[in-house]
Image (cartoon, grey):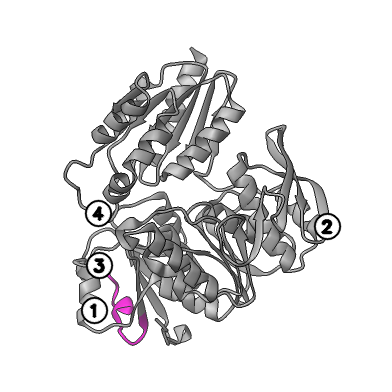
Amino acid sequence: MNVQINISAYKNLYFIGIGGIGMSALAQYFLKTGKKIAGYDKVPSNITKRLEKLGIEIHYKEDIGLISKQLLEKEKTLIVYTPAIPKEHKELNYFIKNKYVILKRAALLGLITKETFCFAVAGTHGKTTTTAILGYVLKETGINATSFLGGIATNYKSNLIEGGNKISVVEADEYDRSFLQLRPNIACITTMDADHLDVYKKATILEETFKEFAKIVTNKLFVRYGLGLNGITFGFEEKADYQVKNNRVEKGMSVFDVKTPTETISNVKIQLLGAHNVLNALGAIAMADFYEIPLEKIKQSLVNFKGIERRFDIKINTENLVLIDDYAHHPTEINAIYKTIKKLYPNKYKMVIFQPHLYSRTKDFIEEFATSLAQFDAVKLLDIYPAREKPMQGVTSKWLAEKIKKYHKNVNCIASTKEAVLSHIKTKNTVVSMLGAGDIGEIIKDVCKEMTILEND
């Protein structure tokens, strides 16, 4: 869909679902350009609190009466909404009925990419971390880019890396085919695992959509080796154009060499652990190298990148207890987390607290979830986080628990509430992983407190 809108013609932007990670980055960006920004979200969150501190008006009830008169001026206000908003939403329907100009989040981001030189990162896994690494490298090496992130970058405590209006770095979100509205100059595809089957129905349809995305890249496409797409490849494999070699962990950091099509650089260091994160860094390195940033400068900047909140975020790390917080919500991601933990902590008891995200995803990948979670010594399942969905008959965490026990009969697996799960963290010499894309992060402070008490007993 080609959207022909002159954003500069609007003084105000109103965001329905402003607390979403992508929406909030856009809200901050346009606030910096001098626009009047306001929005609605279902519940307060750390993100909405941050926005309110910036002076953005936010309310949490579907009520047009709570919107200031200035924001209701139809000719001066652009309405933006996220696909997570239900069709029956009262405010959205008011704006539709009264014929306001309304855009999906992806369309608005697409307009920005058309007006800038755009780096885009796509993939069912790894795109947030890769985008953040690239955005950080560009900024730290003197490139004045603005980066829109799908997570909170620890270095900036924000999902927006501020820069100019000539270069953009964006996540290319495959959900709802959103990334087809972008106009990337340089792009990267990290993975194409089956996901969002509520939208795509079949994995093959998802793959075809990624191929469509590849076709809209104007300058250069980088792809994970083995995806079967035409582009410059990156990976651990010897035939990859950009190859990781000699990957290891030293003093809590990933250290590796990178072989490019023209040279090799040794002892690249990054404060992210796990082979999957090394690949994320490699994708960012490849794009920055193609943009002609010297490899030595890229290497120097990577050392100080501190990661993304809830991406293998180590909250506690003592001799007895380790607590890891991660956004992992797909079986492939859970496997990557377990593989990393097993390598780093081979002799520790491995417990996972997992909150399934979406009934449809749980149903579509029930066997894969069961086998990935059954690798842990103990599994505590929270209720399924519904997000935009309504419950499905028989699709519950108890069902998943039964499946897990099929693959690992001796696993300590129960379905639990957020409140009760704390009582199960009693074993010392334990790694606890808190995984999920819902609101599991709300109890992270309580879990930290409980584990600190255990450590001091």
Q: Which residue is mark 3?
A: 66
Which of these two is toward me, 324 or 447?
A: 324
At horizontal 36% and vertical 46% (from top left) the residue drawn is 438
Q: Does the CB distance between marks 4 and 3 fall below 8 Å?
A: no
Q: Amino acid at mark 4?
A: Glu
Pair 4/3: label in front: 4
Q: Does the CB distance between marks 2 and 1 fall below 8 Å?
A: no
At horizontal 28% and vertical 63% (from top left) the residue drawn is 85
Bin the neighbour count of mark 1 within 10 Å (Cα to Cα): few under 14, some 14-19, many 20 and up. Answer: few
Which of these two is toward me, 381 or 86?
A: 381
Separation of marks 4 and 2 at Cα, in angstroms: 49 Å
Q: Amino acid at mark 3?
A: Leu
Give the percent coordinates (x, y) of residue 95. 25, 77
Choose the circle earlier in sequence order: 1 or 4.
1
Q: Which residue is mark 1?
A: 96
Instruction: Tell how many labels.
Output: 4
Choose the circle earlier in sequence order: 3 or 1.
3
Above or below — where is 148 with respect to 314? Answer: below
Bin the neighbour count of mark 2 within 10 Å (Cα to Cα): few under 14, some 14-19, many 20 and up. Answer: few
At horizontal 68% and vertical 69% (from top left) the residue drawn is 144
Q: Which residues are magenta?
A: 65-77
Bin the neighbour count of mark 4 within 10 Å (Cα to Cα): few under 14, some 14-19, many 20 and up. Answer: few
The question of residue 410 being in magenta is answered with no
Q: Which residue is mark 2?
A: 263
Specify the quadrant of the image occupied by residue 134. Answer: bottom right
Give the percent coordinates (x, y) of residue 334. 46, 39
Pair 4/2: label in front: 2
Separation of marks 4 and 3 at Cα, in angstroms: 26 Å
Separation of marks 3 and 1 at Cα, in angstroms: 18 Å
Pair 2/1: label in front: 2
- Secondary structure at badge 1 equals helix
